[in-house]
Amino acid sequence: MLCCRFCHHLALHSSNSNSSVRMQAYSNNSIISSSSNSSSGSGSIISPMVVGREAGFEEGDLERPRWAGDDVLSRFVTALIAIKPLFNIMKFGARQVVIRTAEKKGINWSKMADEVLESDVYAEKELLEDKSLVYPDYYLKEFHAYADGNLSWKAASEVAPATLSMVLHTIPTAKTAAEAAERVRGAWLWAIEDHHRAHSNGLGVSAILDVGCSTGESTQALAAGFPDAELVGLDLSPHFLAVAQYMQKKRVASGKPGSERSISWVHANGESTGLPAASFDIVSLAFVIHECPQHAIKNLLKEAYRLLRPGGTVALTDNSPKSKVIQSLPPAVFTLMKSTEPHSDEYYLLDLDGAMKEIGFINVTSVLTDPRHRTVTGTVPLK
């Protein structure tokens, strides 16, 4: 299964209690802590280091996979991808792998995508889109086997089924997609909350920005994990945001528990959001930066630093270069993955911890929060 952007924003089923989300997340591994008070006003906390160790998440022997970066194998795969006819075959193959994997897991890919495409989602794009926004060059290139990248209804309609497929592949022991999503998202929320409580000097969580929110799955998860916070979901794709807002309105209309939460959706570039400085307690980037060139990653971090209050937390969840699972991917899989991820080499070559420290973040911490992914957190120093 490909670890790519359109399948990275993971679904999390609604819960009336954020602590119950965390309790369910690793209940199968018996990694449960007793309730305690927290600066974020939430329930049980457990160190993400303990989560990873107890769950058996393993790091490989390398700093990054041999098929990424400037190693000989990586250069060979990159040379293959540069051959246009071969690239087109790889691109088609990558898409088929994703869809077949989903369907084998009982996920009706076509039905889920059609439900979006046949809905009233198009009107939401007109309400949300900033038509004056100038897209960065890297965002306009072919991406994820879509000719128009994330700027297409096809890509937006397929986020949900691809997400379910990915989480099931990440947690193969899960009996359902809901369980897999809860375990992946639960560990991610734990890592954010644990870091914030340890390093924020008592700063509460009243406002959270979800950069690269896609169709809103990660934003909904943050809303469940931090029930007292105002949520803003920001993305470069008006198509993704339209789906996010449409689905939010649909949840509100259905009366689902927690659906009354107000979430603002903003069409903007995460490198320069135009939002007020020092206005958020947490800035999250979930499965975003592996899709960006290094200069964009650094700009995203600089903007997050500007937007956070002193004591605030930045959290980046993404592929772990040190994941034993990722380092052990078979050649067919990593070749297909690289064919749809044009910036993967830049991502794996980046010293993310070092870049964060250079920008000014302190208490930088990186931990495996599931077998494939790490969550890297940092703090804006107190003035």
Image (cartoon, grey):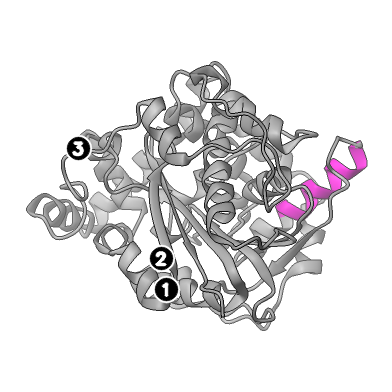
Residue drawn 15% across and 58% down? 79
Residue drawn 35% across and 39% down? 93
Mark 3 element type = helix
Residue 64, visible in the rendered structure: yes
Image quadrant where residue 236 sits: bottom right
The first of marks 2 and 3 along the sequence is: 2
Mark 2 element type = loop
Distance from the alpha carbon under mark 1 to that under mark 2: 6 Å
**Depicted 122 relative to depicted 128: above or below:** above
Mark 2 residue crowding within 10 angstroms, few (<14) / some (14–19) / many (20+): some
Asked if residue 289 lies left or right of residue 88, the reply is right
Residue with the mark numbered 1: 296
- Which callout, 2 or 3, points to the residue nearer the camera? 2
Asked if residue 310 lies left or right of residue 144, the reply is right
Q: Position of residue 329 (x, y in %)?
A: 25, 35
Magenta span: chief secondary structure: helix
Residue drawn 71% across and 68% down? 266
Q: Are marks 1 and 2 in contact (CB under 8 Å)?
A: yes
Residue with the mark numbered 2: 292
Q: Position of residue 263 (x, y in %)?
A: 79, 57
Residue 331's label in the rendered image is 3
Distance from the alpha carbon under mark 1 to that under mark 3: 28 Å
Mark 1 element type = helix
Q: Which residues, given as a range, are shown in magenta?
A: 243-254
Mark 3 residue crowding within 10 angstroms, few (<14) / some (14–19) / many (20+): few
Using the image as rendered, state which of residue 281 and residue 138 is in the foreground: 281
Membership of 251 in magenta stretch: yes
The first of marks 1 and 3 along the sequence is: 1
- Quadrant where the N terminus sits is top left
Distance from the alpha carbon under mark 2 to that under mark 3: 23 Å
- The amino acid type of the residue labelled 3 equals Pro
Residue drawn 50% across and 33% down? 167
